Image: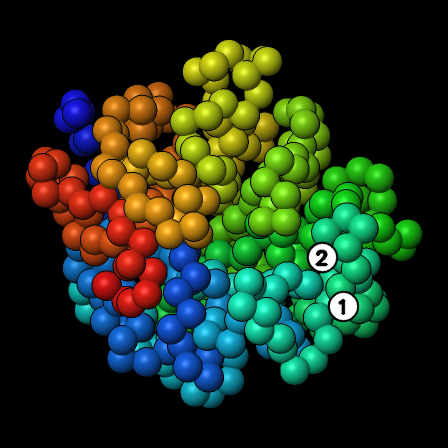
């Protein structure tokens, strides 16, 4: 395996009030280790270890806003309520003590459920009462429900800033609530939150972003995560052309998003190879090109197998960072998020920084069963 010069990954990066020492982000990864939704000592230590391991920006696992049935598993942490917010205060204080930076990822999982079939106490909600095209589940959101959800996102962001977090990430990907509005297959609404174009279906997300910006002020960075694929269907594409991608993402940047976090299964794959070839821009590259915003790329960094194999219990061996370095050197995107490699080894970034490639670990699916 080749060992490239990775110094390009360790350039500083700044946006609004956020100043990072390197370009490596810990990707948000659901862990399900928050009893009653409250982060405890184990969660604090888990995130502290990543800060001590020189991760530039830590993105938390998905945390839920204050809406009924906003999570799809009972072990997912809350980002509301006195006990949960006190737990998150302990987390961010520990991260700062270790010299790190962190943003909570705030979300609403819509009408999805995990394979354990955990059910919330209230009916799940979504744009059109669908979990996938032609697959009904839950209730259709009223305009009052939508307004309350927008307010809940804004409150969570305001609380994140008050607790001392360095930024906030809004989850708008992977077939969860916001993404269910983007996706024509799950948004069949005929009011102002639906429509045949993704620009029309982005109204809900734009209102959330505008409310969050109003809640946190002009200097606090807002990140938003997007994906073409959905957990309900890995082949779905919201934007089939760069022009449609611009219609989708630019209004959200104009509403206040600073950084677009573009989730794809394999970061090295071109988004529109029919336009710029097999070595063309990936999702984050095209998002940066059509909006001018900073972007985060992600997808199977440092490992041979993509993330979907982890859900079937498969591990993965370390992979060369050649392709990552090449794309970072040409500034295709600004930051790179690393998931399973950092989940399995809190010192992954430090090892790369010091050229300790022989000490890099592969991914062992057993790591999903504990907070390493």
Q: Which residue is mark 2?
A: 131
Number of the label disc, if any, that sits on residue 205: none
Q: Dot 2 lies on which element?
A: strand
Colouring used for the render = rainbow
At a point 20% along the width and 63% down the height, the residue shown is 49
Query: 285 or 214, which is in the foreground?
Result: 285
- Residue 171 placement: quadrant: bottom right
Q: Is 142 placed above or below 177 here?
A: below
Q: Is residue 75 visible?
A: yes
Q: Which residue is mark 1?
A: 138
The spot of residue 350 in percent (x, y) is 15, 47
| CA gap, disc 1 and disc 2 | 8 Å
Q: In this rendering, would 245 be left or right of 10? A: right
First reached walking from the N terminus: tag 1 or tag 2: 2
Q: Quadrant of the N terminus?
A: top left
Q: Quadrant of the C terminus?
A: bottom left
Q: Is 54 placed above or below 140 here?
A: above
The spot of residue 261 in percent (x, y) is 48, 44
Q: Is 268 placed above or below 55 here?
A: above
Q: In this rendering, would 23 be left or right of 297? A: left
């Amino acid at each position: 395996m080749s060992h490239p010069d990775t110094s390009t990954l360790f350039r500083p990066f700044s946006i609004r009030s956020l100043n990072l020492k390197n370009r490596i982000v810990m990707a948000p990864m659901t862990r399900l280790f928050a009893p009653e939704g409250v982060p405890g000592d184990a969660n604090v230590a888990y995130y502290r270890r990543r800060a001590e391991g020189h991760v530039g920006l830590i993105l938390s696992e998905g945390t839920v806003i204050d809406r009924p049935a906003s999570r799809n598993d009972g072990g997912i942490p809350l980002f509301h309520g006195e006990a949960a917010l006190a737990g998150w205060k302990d987390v961010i204080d520990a991260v700062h003590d270790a010299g790190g930076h962190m943003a909570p990822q705030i979300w609403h999982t819509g009408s999805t459920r995990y394979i354990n079939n955990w059910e919330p106490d209230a009916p799940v909600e979504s744009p059109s009462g669908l979990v996938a095209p032609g697959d009904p589940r839950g209730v259709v959101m009223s305009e009052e429900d939508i307004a309350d959800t927008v307010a809940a996102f804004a409150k969570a962001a305001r609380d994140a800033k008050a607790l001392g977090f360095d930024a906030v990430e809004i989850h708008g990907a992977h077939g969860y609530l916001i993404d269910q509005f983007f996706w024509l297959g799950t948004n069949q609404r005929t009011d102002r939150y639906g429509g045949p174009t993704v620009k029309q279906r982005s109204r809900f997300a734009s209102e959330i972003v505008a409310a969050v910006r109003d809640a946190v002020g002009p200097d606090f960075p807002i990140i938003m995560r997007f994906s073409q694929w959905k957990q309900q269907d890995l082949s779905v594409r919201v934007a089939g052309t760069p022009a449609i991608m611009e219609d989708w993402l630019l209004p959200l940047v104009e509403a206040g998003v600073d950084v677009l976090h573009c989730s794809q299964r394999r970061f090295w794959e071109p988004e529109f190879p029919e336009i710029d070839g097999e070595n063309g821009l990936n999702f984050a590259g095209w998002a940066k090109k059509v909006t001018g915003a900073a972007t985060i790329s992600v997808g199977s960094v440092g490992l041979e197998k993509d993330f979907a194999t982890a859900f079937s219990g498969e591990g993965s061996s370390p992979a060369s960072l050649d392709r990552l370095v090449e794309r970072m050197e040409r500034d295709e995107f600004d930051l790179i998020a690393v998931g399973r490699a950092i989940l399995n080894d809190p010192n992954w970034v430090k090892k790369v920084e010091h050229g300790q490639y022989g000490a890099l670990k592969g991914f062992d699916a057993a790591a999903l069963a504990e907070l390493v």
